[in-house]
Amino acid sequence: MCNKNNFLAAIEGNDHEKVPVWFMRQAGRYLPKYHELRKNRSIMEITLDPNTVEEISYLPVNEIGVDASIIFSDILLPVETMGFTLHYEDGKGPMISNSVLSGQNSKIMDYEPAADPYLPVEAVRLFKSRHPSTPLIGFCGGPVTVASYLIKGESDGDLAATRSLMYRKPDVYRRILRHVTDAMILLLKSQISAGCDVVQIFDSWAGSMSRDQFQQYRENFLSDIFTELGSSRSIYFSTSSWHLVDQLKELGATFLSMDWRSDLSSLIGVVRSGTGLQGNLDPVLSQSGSQACETETRRIVDSMLDQDGYIFNLGHGVLPGTDPGTLRDIVNIVHSYSR
Ligand code: CP3
């Protein structure tokens, strides 16, 4: 049995024996039980039902053996409360019909947690009352990642539409970023008040910014999140962001989570003292045969044993169709290490 508190020990910077591990799922489509619980309901219907949200959130702890759960929600659900119309399309992901570029949205509304039916506070309370010793991760999207969906209306992974707006209409870009940043702060605070032990900021597309663009973004928006979080524990996740490492170090996040493109161990001793590191197995490897996956899992853990505050994770989310057995094997390998 794994020690469920090794995740919190790592987050809190205490000595711990076992390396903790958890996975971002983007809905847990790899778990048959998820499909059963979901039936024919959309994510938007499910998130209005705290009992089902709680149950889905706990599944990976029960079935895979990870050391922490992430609450079941999505980074885009809060935008409905800001006046955007969201739906999820199979194969395409989230779509916003009245995006900024569609010209159909003249005004972004202030985010009001009390008016957001999808805010998972009741589910967080239920989870912590049913599983008090399981660490629970709350989350939000990074401001530029959420803003990119508001601007383009769908995934803008290389931020082409977002950067174009930044050049053409800097005032509009800044106004959107301000709104979204303030919303994300309220969202995180609500989840922490409800009982989340740590929050993760998923800034998946931030790595598509130049160093100068990221610096402006960090100084004017992103840093506000960490200032407002104060002593609450946080993890900042981004992808393709190796060129930004010297700036990521300055954010004030408790942990930095890097994708598989990065050499995570080269950050040991480089990040500020007390900053933890999370990552970074290539999710594709968990679908590429067990030998290659085991070799790389061991290489990563071996290379991170000298890091105080380390959480094993994929370099992005679990891909749909991944065999749960492979994920269980990864967890067992990581837990076989003693420090
Ligand atoms: O691990 C978890 O399940 C926690 C919940 C979670 C979801 N989305 C559920 C989800 C988390 C942490 C996210 C984060 C998220 N969502 C990000 C940041 C991380 C990343 O993947 O880069 C982004 C960019 C989104 C936006 C989003 N939502 C996309 C791009 C998609 C399509 C994904 C795909 O592979 O098709 C979604 C769909 C989504 N995310 C759903 C849920 C419950 C609906 C999936 C479904 O229909 O079952």
Image: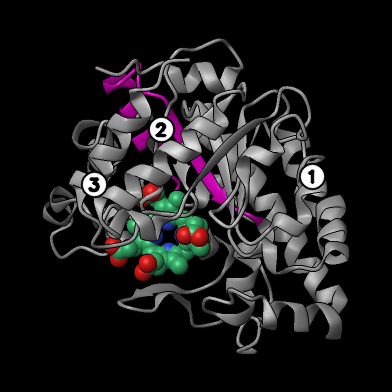
| Real-space CA distance between mark 1 and mark 2, rounded to the nearest whole angstrom | 27 Å
Q: Nearer the viewer, mark 1 or mark 2?
A: 2
Residue at 71% of width from left, 55% of height from top? 242
Residue 318 visible to the viewer: yes
Residue 115 pos. (x, y %): 51, 51
Tell me where residue 275 appears, x and y as whole percent. Answer: 70, 28
Q: Nearer the viewer, residue 280 or 10?
A: 280
User: Residue at the spot x=30%, y=77% of the render?
Assistant: 90
* Residue 263 vs residue 245, the one in the foreground: 263
Label 2, label 3: how many angstroms apart (C-alpha)? 14 Å
- The label nearer to you, 2 versus 3, is 3
Q: Which quarter of the image is occupied by the N terminus? A: top left
Determine whether 201 is above or below 180 in the image. above
Comparing 239 with 326, the one in front is 326
Task: Rate crowding at label 1 as few (under 14), some (14 to 19) or many (20 or more) other CA atoms within 10 Å.
Answer: some
Q: Quadrant of ligand 1?
A: bottom left
Whether disc 1's CB lies below 8 Å from ligand 1 is answered no
- Residue bearing mark 3: 326
Residue 291 shown left or right of residue 177 in the figure: left
Residue type, numbered disc 3: Thr
Span of residues in magenta: 118-142
Amino acid type, residue under disc 1 in the picture: Ser
In reply to whether residue 5 is colored magenta, the answer given is no
Looking at the image, which residue is at 55% across and 10% down? 15
Disc 2 residue type (three-letter): Val
For marks 1 and 2 on the same chain, the one whose residue lies earlier in the sequence: 2
Q: Give the left or right position of residue 14, taking residue 65 as reference.
A: right
